[in-house]
Amino acid sequence: MNISIYDKYGGYKTLHVVVSLFYKKIMESENLIHYFENVDLARLIEHQTKFLTTSLGGPVMYETKLLKSAHANLKIPLKDFMEVATLLKEALVESKVEEQDIDKIIEVVASYKNDIVTA
Ligand code: HEM
C-alpha cells in the first residue's frame, strides 16, 4: 500500500509538533527573527501545518497559491530561504522523519522557491 508522508507519521497532530519546532528554530535565528516580529505565530504555525498537510498527501486545507501573496512584500533573498529550508530539515531530522521522506518534503518546499524569494 502506498501511504502518504502525512499519514505515515501520524497526520495533523504530528505535523503540528514538527512545525512548532521549526518556528522555534526560526525565532532563535538572529538573522530571521525580524521577519516575524509582528506576526501572530500561532496563526502562522497553523497555516504552515495546513500547507504541509495539503502538500504531503493529507486533506486539502490550504490554497497553495496564497504563498506568493503572503511573501510578496517581505523581500526575501535566496540566502534566507536556504536558512529556513535548513531549519525545516533540522526539525524533521530531530523529529525522526526518515531521510528519504525529508528529501521529498524539502523537494516540495523548494518547488515554491520562486513564489517566496523576491529580493
Ligand atoms: C521555505 C519555504 C517556505 C514555506 C513553505 C512557507 C510557508 C508559509 C506559509 C504557509 C505562510 C502562511 C501564509 C498565510 O497566512 O496564508 C507563511 C507566512 C510567512 N512566511 Fe513563509 N514560508 C517559507 C519561507 C519563508 C522564508 C524564507 C521567510 C523569511 C525569511 C518566510 C517568512 C514568512 C512570514 C514573515 C510570514 C507571515 C506573513 C504574514 O502573515 O504577514 N517564509 N509562510
Image: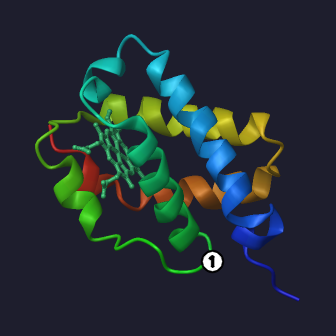
Residue at 29% in and 34% down: 39
Q: Residue 80: x and y, percent?
A: 34, 29
Would residue 75 appear left or right of 38 to someone viewing this image?
left
- Secondary structure at numbered mark 1: loop
Q: Residue 17: x and y, percent?
A: 68, 44
Residue at 17% in and 37% down: 74
Q: Read off the residue under disc 1.
A: 57
Would residue 65 appear left or right of 89 to someone viewing this image?
left
Q: Residue 90: x and y, percent?
A: 66, 33
Would residue 88 appear left or right of 91 to someone viewing this image?
left
- Amino acid type assigned to the residue bearing label 1 in the image: Gly
Residue at 16% in and 44% down: 118
Q: How many marks?
A: 1
Q: Residue 105: x and y, percent?
A: 60, 58
The colour scheme used to paint the residues is: rainbow
- In the image, is residue 71 above or below residue 61? above
* The residue positioned farthest toward the top in the image shown: 30
* The residue positioned farthest toward the right in the image shown: 1
Q: Please tell me in which quadrant of the rendered image residue 27 appears.
A: top left
- In the image, is residue 119 above or below residue 66? above
Pick the residue in front: 43 or 6.
Answer: 43
- In the image, is residue 92 above or below residue 50? above
Assign the C terminus to one quadrant of the image: top left
Pick the residue in front: 11 or 30.
Answer: 11
* The residue positioned farthest toward the bottom in the image shown: 1
- In the image, is residue 84 above or below residue 107? above
